Image (cartoon, helix red, strand yellow):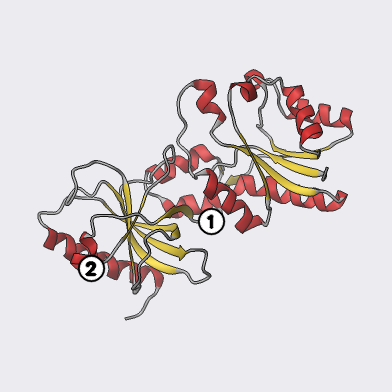
Amino acid sequence: MEKRVIALGFFDGVHLGHAELIKKAKERAGSIGARPAVLTFDRHPDSLVSGKEVELISSPEDRAELIRRYFGVEDIISLRFDEGMMKMPWDKFVEWLAGDLGAVGFVAGHDFRFGWKGEGDTEKLKSKSAEAGLCCDIIPRVELDGVTVSSTYIRSLLKAGDVETAARFLGHPHTLTDSVRFGYRLGSKLGTPTINMRFEQGVLAPAYGVYAARVTIDGESLRRFAVTNVGVRPTVSGEGTVSVESYILDYDGNLYGKRVRLEFMRFMRPERRFENVDALKEQIFRDRKETEKYFGIEK
């Protein structure tokens, strides 16, 4: 079995604090001839423990993709967090990681808790690791501008539409990846063809409104720019379903079914209802001009 140094946590959003864990796991693994790995779960543990669903910053797919893209770690262990996992005693969890997953070392954050009723903490993890001859590194609190970097804080920024500050705490833009869906095709009729995406169930949507965004199509290296609306499209739809609709600047092609990565760069204005479709069309072109200005696109 291949030896692993495992970074432990949930890694929602893959922020600056998580970055320190992953970098340390890579460093430690390299020093002892092991493979760096990141352990996460399919759902937030607090959702099962508290019975109240925790909205996620990123889907499991986006979480894994961010770890691969920014840190080059391919070994991502996504465990199902069910009642059996929740009730596993903390010491048995460590033994299981070492025995079944080949862990020879761990990296965890200063406030990491694990095991049934959260009885495991960093002191117990260090003690148990030492007994078993495993290495264990604990990463101290990471702060930015005097604020502790945390998924909870970043969620509050996204809900307020402050994607620029969120990007500073994440270390990268807030990301959504999805397959392009069929929509109303109203954009094509307005001369601004759009692609339609949605947030996976359980993933929070940033504040409703219009954003300047970057777009990557099917993993291509070329980054495109878009005007993106997040919301319920009050002018043309009464469904109330949250959608993500992007008008990609200077792009002509059929993207239905393609995988698209959307990066939210700047909040431009709140979503609002327009008197008619013509008024909406005029605003879309103003949004385009504002987006071009933000990205420095000269016309």
Q: What residue appears at the point 34 percent right and 70 percent down from the top-left corner?
A: 249
Residue 289 at what x, y percent from top left? 28, 70
For the C terminus, which image quadrant?
A: bottom left
| Residue pointed to by mark 1 | 172
Amino acid marked by disc 1:
His
Q: Do callouts 2 and 1 mark residues in contact (Cβ within 8 Å)?
A: no
Amino acid marked by disc 2:
Phe
Residue 137: tell me if it is visible: no
Residue 204 at what x, y percent from top left? 41, 41
For the N terminus, which image quadrant?
A: top right
Looking at marks 2 and 1 on the same chain, the residue that comes earlier in the sequence is marked by 1
Q: Quadrant of residue 157?
A: top left
> For this view, does 188 lie left or right of residue 297?
left
The residue at the far left in this view is 275
Q: In this view, does 105 lie above or below 26?
A: above
Label 2 neighbourhood size at 10 Å, few (<14), some (14-19), many (20+)?
some
| Residue pointed to by mark 2 | 285
Q: What residue appears at the point 49 percent right and 63 percent down from the top-left corner?
A: 218
Q: Is residue 288 above or below residue 61?
A: below
Please give the label number shown on residue 80. Answer: none
